[in-house]
Image (spheres, rainbow, N blue to C red):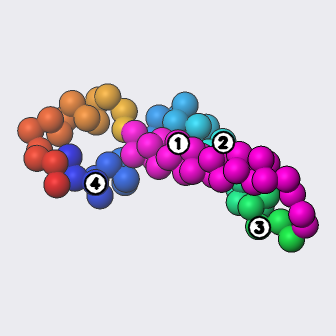
Amino acid sequence: MKVIHRVTAPTPKFFKVLRTVGMVLAAIGGTVLAAPVAIPATIVHVAGYLTVAAGVVTAVSQLTIPEATAAKTDGDEVE
């Protein structure tokens, strides 16, 4: 299945919620990283990891498709 088809295919409800949570966590991490005040280094490191992890969760959730849709396109080559 091509990536374009995966992105435009409907996303299951659970992964829509997970995608939203990932976006919120990425926003929180980005806000902490961009804060103009002095923040302890540990918190800044955790915020960096949080932002990366949230980005990965969001991307994976966006590319997840229902099983029925995947079964219809099993013969397609991955590009």
Question: Is residue 20 visible in the rendered structure shown here?
Answer: no
Q: Residue at x 85, y 53 (%)?
A: 40
Residue identified by numbered label 4: 3
Q: Residues within 10 Å of mark 3 (few under 14, many from 20)?
A: few
Element at label 1: helix
The stretch of residues the image draws in magenta is 37-64
Say whether residue 15 is left or right of residue 69: right
Q: Quadrant of residue 53?
A: top right
Q: Residues within 10 Å of mark 4 (few under 14, many from 20)?
A: few
Dot 4 and dot 3 residues touching (CB under 8 Å): no
Q: Residue at x 87, y 57 (%)?
A: 39
Dot 2 and dot 3 residues touching (CB under 8 Å): no
Q: Amino acid at mark 4?
A: Val
Q: Earlier in the sequence, mark 3 or mark 1?
A: 3
Q: Earlier in the sequence, mark 2 or mark 3?
A: 2
Element at label 3: loop
Which residue sits furthest front?
41
Q: Amino acid at mark 1?
A: Val
Dot 1 and dot 2 residues touching (CB under 8 Å): yes
| Disc marking residue 34 | 3
Say whether residue 43 is left or right of residue 20: right
In terms of secondary structure, what is the magenta stretch mainly? helix
Q: Amino acid at mark 3?
A: Ala
Residue 2 spot, x, y in % from top left? 22, 53
Q: Amino acid at mark 2?
A: Val
